[in-house]
Amino acid sequence: MKGQLIKALAFDDQIRVFVVDATDLVKRAQEKHQTWHTATAALGRSLVATALLSANLKGDDHLLVQIKGNGPLGLISCDGDTQGRIRGYVSNPNVALELNSKGKLDVARAVGLPGSLKVSKYLADSEAFTGQVELISGELGEDFTYYMAVSEQTPSSIGLSVLVNPDESVQSAGGFMIQVLPGTSDEVIDQLETRIKSLGSLSELIDGSEAITDLLDSLVGLNNSRVISQQPVEFYCPCSKERFRKSLAVLDSNMLQQMIDEDKGAEVICQYCSATYQFSEEELKAILANQ
Ligand code: ZN
């Protein structure tokens, strides 16, 4: 199972469930940014959450997630759309901290409190929406759960997981978002809470699942849900040389002249995917002449 997200209804349509296997997405992000393990876990969990939140959008909507703590990572920025096309970066990819007291990657310390979690939604048919909350743990799953409750008034349970191999590669990544729909019986809520508490390690569960529906079954029980939709999730960056040419064209002419005179060209690196684009002296001169 690689790179799939499913939306389902469970417990006789009383519960909405999103489940994602984002192994390929996080693997690509780690390779592109050469993140070290604690940074991989933090960026990976943010990418998984972005995939889950993006699945809640419609049509041409897209969203931007920004996490800024006072830890060594700096800013984590991710965006995604309804097609499951997700990308992201972290200011400092070279963060490798000692494991925490539970023997887990210390994402909370790498993110660092105090800090904020901001979600901006760009909606095709209405005004953009921005919600922001203070970080409450830095482990990110709890922070996104808190964000959903406070900013979107949608009580949710969110689990995010990234398993990193000793050689820094990503073994597995994924997560879930469970939402209780209005009118859900207390009995169902109790059953669900008990199930989630007894889940055990989410990363082992994801790593051990052959199909994404196995993960769904582990969460809500066998034959207790129906899948509404299934879609791929991938690392995707729409950057191109043409897009960067347009960004260079709006630079101050003195700055462009300086690049021509002193650097004899320019090398532009996409923050989101680390792709590199070269502009020759002649290309810069053409951009300057067209300003
Ligand atoms: Zn890019």
Image (tube, rainbow, N blue to C red):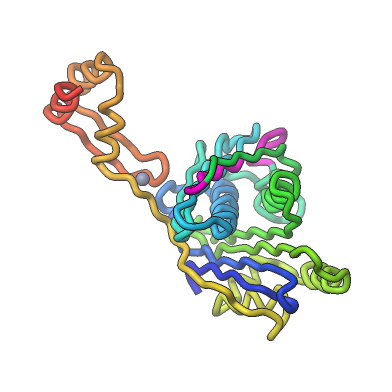
Q: Where is ligand 1, by quadrant?
A: top left
The answer to whether residue 221 is left or right of residue 260 is: right
- Count of residue discs: 0
User: Seen from this angle, which residue lies furthest left?
Assistant: 282
Q: Is residue 124 above or below residue 226?
A: above
Q: Is residue 275 above or below residue 219?
A: above
Residue 181 visible in this rendered orientation of the protein? yes
Towards the viewer: 87 or 125:
125
**Segment colored magenta:** 109-125
Residue 100 visible in this rendered orientation of the protein? no
**Which quadrant of the figure has residue 197?**
bottom right
Q: Position of residue 271 (x, y in %)?
A: 41, 39
Image quarter in which the C terminus is found: top left
User: Seen from this angle, which residue lies furthest bottom?
Assistant: 223
> Which residue is found at the position 69% from the left and 58% from the top?
158
> Which residue is found at the position 28% from the left and 44% from the top?
240
> Which residue is found at the position 59% from the left and 61% from the top?
163
**Which quadrant of the figure has residue 104?**
bottom right
Q: Is residue 169 above or below residue 107?
A: below
> Which residue is found at the position 55% from the left and 45% from the top?
121
- The verdict on residue 116 being magenta is yes
Q: Position of residue 211 (x, y in %)?
A: 55, 78
- The verdict on residue 225 being magenta is no
Q: Position of residue 61 (x, y in %)?
A: 49, 51
User: Seen from this angle, which residue lies furthest front?
Assistant: 125
Towards the viewer: 153 or 169:
153
**Which quadrant of the figure has residue 173?**
bottom right
Q: Is residue 50 above or below residue 20?
A: above
